[in-house]
Image (cartoon, rainbow, N blue to C red):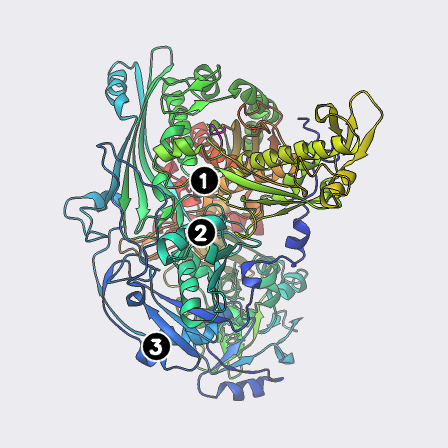
Amino acid sequence: MPKDIDAKESGIGAASKRREDIRFLSGTGNYTDDINLNGQAYVHFLRSDVAHGRITSIETAEAAAMPGVLRIFTGADFEGVGSIPCGWQVTDRFGEVMQEPAHPVLAQGKVRHVGDPIAAVVAETAEAARDAAEAIELDIEELPAVVDMKAALAEGAPKVHDDLTSNLCYDWGFVEDNKAAVNAAFEAAAHVTSLELVNNRLVANPMEPRVAVGDFNRATGDSTLYTTSQNPHVIRLLMGAFVLGIPEHKLRVVAPDVGGGFGSKIFHYAEEAFCTFAAKALNRAVKWTSSRSEAFMSDAHGRDHVTKIELALDADNNFTALRTDTLANMGAYLSTFAPSVPTWLHGTLMAGNYKTPLIYVNVKAVFTNTVPVDAYRGAGRPEATFQLERVIDKAALELGVDPIALRRQNFITEFPYATPVAVEYDTGDYVATMDKLEEIADIAGFAARRAESERAGKLRGLGVNCYIEACGIAPSNLVGQLGARAGLYESATVRVNATGGIVVMTGSHSHGQGHETSFPQVIASMIGIDENMVEIEHGDTNNAPMGMGTYGSRSLAVGGSAMVRATEKIIAKAKKIAAHLMEAADADIELKDGQFSVAGTDKSVAWGDVTLAAYVPHNYPLEEIEPGLEETAFYDPSNFTYPSGAYACEVEVDPETGKVSIARFAAADDFGNIVNPMIVDGQVHGGIGQGIGQALLEGCVYDENGQLLSASFMDYAMPRADDVPFYEVDHSCQTPCTHNPLGVKGCGEAGAIGSPPAVVNAVVNALRSAGKDVTHIDMPLSPARVWAAMQG
Amino acid sequence: MYEFEFTRPASVAEAVAALNAEEAQALGGGQTLIPTLKQRLAMPTTLVSLSGVAEMQGIGLQDDGQLVIGGATTHAEVASGAVGTYPALAALAGQIGDPAVRNRGTLGGSLANNDPAACYPAAALGSGATIVTNTREIPADEYFQGMFTTALEEGEIVVSVKFPVPEAANYQKFVQPASRFAMVGVFAARFADGVRVAVTGASEEGVFRWTDAEAALASSFTPDAISALSVDPDGMIGDIHGTKAYRAHLVNVMTRRAVAAAV
Ligand SMILES: Cc1cc2nc3c(=O)[nH]c(=O)nc-3n(C[C@H](O)[C@H](O)[C@H](O)COP(=O)(O)OP(=O)(O)OC[C@H]3O[C@@H](n4cnc5c(N)ncnc54)[C@H](O)[C@@H]3O)c2cc1C
C-alpha cells in the first residue's frame, strides 16, 4: 500500500476521513451518560476506604428513611446471586487449575481493596443517594493488608481470601518441558545478561468514565443494560448466565458511543450487574455514573509485573536461551481476562523478533489488597516486549556491541517460523522494518544531533527496539486449550436494502477505533460502490447475532474478516439474481464498479437493479433462491496475526533536574495490508502516546496499607500534548497476513507495545553518554528517578 | 456537593457582611473551592462570590511605584495586564494551571488558600508584597504561616495586593508531573536595597524565604554565587513525585536559573 495517504480516494487504501468524528467532536454523540430513561433512579455506591477489613455491622435503617431514598442494598441482598465470573482459567505448571476466589457484586463479610463496593443506595437523585450513603453506619474491623507481591507470597502473610490456601493464584511455567534444556543452555553460555525490572501499574483513564443504566420492562419481563463496554455480547453472556441468571433472549446489552476503553471496558463489572438487578427489584431504571475518583479505585488497572529476565548468548553473540521469572499482580479479585494476561498473552511473545531457540517463562500470579488488574492496551505483550528489549540493550552494553547490530544478528528471517513458545509467525520482515526505521529516524544523523544538544547543556540519547505482537485474537480451538472459557471468533450480518444501501451489524465494537469509516471501505471495494452507501451498526446485542468485541487488535482481522465472508455470500447471491435478470449463467457474471456484467458481452445490470429485484421479486428465480439480500457469517481465525516493527526514540535529559523530553520518535511498523492509512497513523500515534505515558509519567502507587496514593489526576500523571513530539510513522513495510481474507494484522496496540523500551533505552543511553554507570531505571522515568539514577 | 446559598455582593462592605453569616465562605474563581465542594470536603451554607466586587478588580500602578492588583483579578488578567509593569509576575501568572484555570482563578483566592505548591505565594513573598484586607495591611513576611495557613482571620477578605516592583526578577517553576503545580518554584527578585528569594512547592512549611541565598546574592547577583549553597532536605516535602533530597537539590537549581534569567 502506498505511503502517500491521498493516493486513493475511496475504498481499501484510502485515507477516508473518520465520519464518526463529526458527532464526537460536535457534542452530538450518544454516550451512555446521555441515556436517561423515564422514571430513572440513581445509585451511589458506598465503597471501602480501607484495603482489607471485616464488616462487623452495616446499619442502613436511618439512611433508608432519608428523603428520596428508594432502597439500600448490601451484600446480603446478593446472597443468592452469582459471583462476577472470570473468563479464563489458567492451569499451573503442576497441572492444577488456578485458585479462583468468589467476587460478590457487593462485599460479603470482607472488603478487599480500597474502593470495594459495600452498599448501594438507590434514590430519586444522585445527590440524595450520596447523602444517604454518608448516613450508613458502617463498622469495619481493619485487617493487615498485603500490597507488595513478594510480601503477599511470604509464609504467614495475611490472606486476601480466607478460603484460598494462600495469595498465590497460580504458578505457571512455560514451556515447562523446556525448563531443563533452558537451564543447561545457561550453564553453557559464553555470556549471561540479567535484569530485574518493574512493569509499572497503570490506570487506563479513558476520557469517558464508566456508566451503567439498568432497565426492566415489567410487561415483557425483559432486562436491558446500557453500559460503557467494548463487548456488549460478552457482558450479556457473563452477567446473564453467571451472575443474574437471565437468558440471552430476555436480556439486551447496549454499548452506544464509548469514549475510549483501552482494555478497561472489556471486563464485566459489579456495577453493571447491580444496575440490572436493582432495576428489576425496584421496577425503575437505575443509573450509575462513575466519578473520576471512583474510576481510579474501581476500573481494572493494568500491568504491574515484577520480572527478572536472563538472556544467554554464545561466544558469537547469538541468543541461546532466555529465562524469566515474573510476579504478576491480580489485585483482590480475578477480573474477566486477568489470568490470561501474564500467561498466554505474555509468555507466548517472549521470543520477540529473535530466533532464541530455548525459552522458559515462569509467572506467579498474586492476590493483593488492591484493585483488580487486567488487560490494558497491549495486555501481556508490552510486558514481554519491555523486558526482552531492555535485556537485549543491556547485553549490548555489557558486550560492547551496537544494539541494533545485535538485534539484526538474531532476527528471525524465515517464515513461517515456529517459536519455542508455542506460536507460529506466519509472515514478517524484521530486516525491512529495521532498515526503514534507520532511514526515517535518521539514525545516521544522531551524532550531530547529540552534539547540538550538548551545546545546549542537554544529554541526548537514542533508544531503538523491536516488537512483535500476537493480534487478531484468537483461534477458538487454541485459546480453548489455553483456558479461555469463550470462543474468540467474530460475527457480522450484512443487510442490503432494496435500494442498494447496506447496513453491517458487527460484533466488533468501536470505542474510538473508527470502524464506522474503515469497515465500509472494505465493502465498498468489494462491490465497487461508494463507501457512503455502507453504514456500520455495533454495540447492541439486538443487532449482530453474537460478538466477542474489540480488544487485542482484533476488529479488522477477525470482525472485518467475518464481514468479508458475509459480503462474499451477498455477492454470490447477487450474481445469481443478476444472471437471472440477464438470462445468463451464474458462472459468467462479473461484478466490477457496482455493475454486474455477462463476460464477453456488453450486457450489464447495476448493483441497485439487483438489490431492488431481491426485494421486489417480480422477475426473480423464486424457485431457486429466496428473496431478500441479507447474510451472516462467523469467522474464526486459524492463527493469531503478528504485527511487528522497529521503534526509535531520541530523548534530551536535563542533567541538573533529570527531566526527560522526547525529542524525536519514529515507528516503522508492518501491519500487513492497510485499509485506511490515516486511521492507522492515528492508532499508532495514540499508542505511542500511551507508551510514552507509561515510560515517563504514569504510575499507580499504593502505600503499605493499601491506600491509593495516586488517586486523582493531581498525582497520577497522564501524558499531555506537550509531552509527546510529532511522530515519524511509516507502515510501508507490508507482509500481509496469510490466513485472513484481508491480509491485515491489526494496529491498535502496536504503539503502546513498542514504545516504552525505546524511551527507556534512550534515557539510559543519554545518561551513559555523560559517563553515568546506569543500566536501568524503572518506569515511570520521572525527573526524580532519573536524577536519583544519575547520583549513583 | 452539599446544598448552599449563593450571593454575589457588589462591594467589599456587602461581602464582609455576607461573610458574617454562620458557615459562609468566600468564593473567588472556585478553582480550588469548587473541586473541594464536589468532593464534599467542605460544607458552607452560603457562598459569597467576590467576582462582582468592582473595587477588587484590576491592576494599577501606585504613585510610590507599587503595583496594586485587586484580590478578585484573574490569573489571565495578570498574565496579560502586568507584562509591561512587572513582567516576572505576569509570566508567573501565565504559568498557573491551564487557560480555564487562569480565566477563573484569582490572586486573592490563591493567596487565601496558600497551597504549599501554589505559585503566587512565591511572588508575594519574593516581592515583599503587602496583602491588603478589608481591615488591615499585612506584610507578606507575616502573612504566610505554613501550608494552607495564613494570617487571615475568619471572614477577612484579600481586597488587593501591593507588589513593590524589583529591578530584576524571575520565577522558575519545576512542575510536578501530574498536577503541574510547582514541585519547586523559586521567585528571585533584586531590589535596590537587597535580594529576596522565595521558594514554593518544596517545604513542609509552605512558601519560605531562602535567606542564605538572599545574602549571597546581595553581594553578587549571579548563579555562581549560590552554587555551593543548599537547603536542608529535612524540612522538604518527600512524596511519590520526589524525595526530600531531590526537592532540596531542585531549590538550588531553580534559584540559579531564576537568577540567570533575571539578570
Ligand atoms: C487544574 C488546576 C491547575 C492549577 N494549577 C495551579 C498552578 O500551577 N499554580 C497555582 O498556583 N495554582 C494552580 N491552581 C490553583 C488556582 O490557581 C486557583 O485558582 C487558586 O488556588 C485559588 O483561587 P480561586 O480564585 O479559584 O479561589 P477559590 O477556589 O474560589 O477559593 C479558594 C479559597 O480561598 C478563599 N478565597 C477566595 N478568594 C478570597 C479572597 N479574595 N479573600 C479571602 N479568601 C478568599 C475561599 O474561601 C477558599 O477558601 C490550579 C487549579 C486547578 C484546578
Main secondary structure of the magenta stretch? loop
Using the image, tell me which numbered label, if any, was put on residue A570. none
Task: Give the quarter of the figure containing the C terminus of chain A.
Answer: top left
Host chain of mark 3 = A
Examine the rendered structure and indicate whether residue B116 appears above or below residue A178: below
Residue bearing mark 1: A695
Residue bearing mark 2: A235
Host chain of mark 2 = A
In depth, the one of A353 and A441 nearer the eye is A353
Tell whether circle 3 marks a residue whose Cβ is less than 8 angstroms from ligand 1.
Answer: no
The quarter of the picture where residue A140 lies is bottom left
Which mark's residue is nearer the viewer, 3 or 1?
A: 3
Label 2: few (<14), some (14–19) or many (≥20) C-alpha neighbours in 10 Å: many
Q: Is B84 placed left or right of A698 in the picture?
A: right
Circles 3 and 1: CB distance less than 8 Å? no
Judged from this view, the residue extending furthest toward the front is A623
Tell me residue B124's x, y (percent): 52, 66
Which residues are drawn in magenta?
Answer: A637-641
Using the image, tell me which numbered label, if any, was put on residue A135. 3
The earlier-in-sequence mark between 2 and 1 is: 2
Kind of residue at badge 3? Ala
What residue appears at the point 68 percent right and 47 percent down from the top-left corner? Answer: A19
Secondary structure type for disc 2: helix
Respond whether the residues carrying marks 3 and 1 are from the same subunit: yes
Tell me residue A333's x, y (percent): 31, 51
Task: Give the quarter of the figure containing the N terminus of chain A.
Answer: top right
Q: Is residue B202 visible?
A: no
Tell me residue A656's x, y (percent): 45, 41
Label 3: few (<14), some (14–19) or many (≥20) C-alpha neighbours in 10 Å: some
Secondary structure type for disc 3: helix
Kind of residue at badge 2? Ile
Find out whether residue B161 is within the magenta segment: no
